[in-house]
Amino acid sequence: MSLAGVLLFVPTPHHDDRGFFTRTFDSAVARAHGLRPEEFVQDSQSRSRRGTIRGLHGRGGRGESKLVRCARGAVLDVLVDARPSSPTFGQQMSVTLDDTTFVHLYVPPGILHGFQALSEQADICYRIDREHSPGEDLSVRYDDPELDIRWPLPVSVISAKDRAAGSWAALVELLGAVRAG
């Protein structure tokens, strides 16, 4: 399953006796897919240990887009479409990001994002097109029964903020969305 506007970038790593080399960002490739690389304003990185879940997070207002990659280890990355006008509203997709394939995930505005660390440690790098504005943060509980996300591992760590996140139904109401059938 894929969500409208979500892109996967698959670089070609070059391996030799020293290790490997791979390009982690190429503005020409981004432009060829309709992105505007000059609009990205912040790079961030997080480290999580096995079983940790971060998310599901999004941004209100005009939203934010981000490029996400796993620089170390592996994660299951989960996206939920929270754009009421989208043809894939309410649907979800997941993709494994790791330090072997180097797949990058483009997350457009209006998509909730979360992940679970699958390896002993996982480093996630984010390239974001807006400065953080805490007043626009949106979140939905990682274990919301309506979304029924199948996390592959037992949850080892989750932040108090993520445990206190609201439900999918509450976010849908907040967005004024009308759900089909």
Image: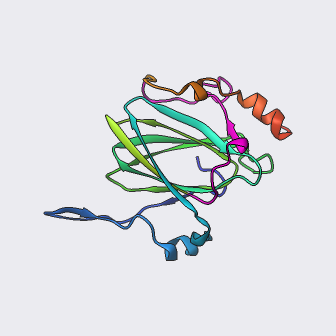
Q: Nearer the viewer, residue 179 or 39?
A: 39
Left or right, residue 91 beside residue 94: right
Residue 39, by quadrant, is: bottom right
Question: Which residue occupies the foreground of this view, 61 or 175?
Answer: 61
Name the residue rendered at 86%, 38% in the picture.
178
Q: Is residue 147 above or below residue 26?
A: above
Q: Does the magenta stretch include residue 133?
A: yes
The residue at 79%/35% (across/down) is: 172
98 falls in the magenta region: no
Q: Residue, x 70% and y 27% (percent of image)?
A: 166
Q: In which quarter of the image is residue 55?
A: top right
Q: Is residue 179 visible?
A: no
Which residue: 66% across, 54% down? 64
Q: Is the magenta stretch mostly helix, strand or loop?
A: loop
Q: Is residue 115 above or below residue 125?
A: above
Q: Where is residue 113 in the image (x, y as percent from the top left)?
A: 59, 43
On screen, residue 19 versus residue 32, left or right, reads: left
> How far across and down, in percent of the image, does residue 99 sit?
33, 51
Q: Is residue 34 left or right of residue 11?
A: right
In the rendered structure, which segment of residues is drawn in magenta?
Answer: 128-153
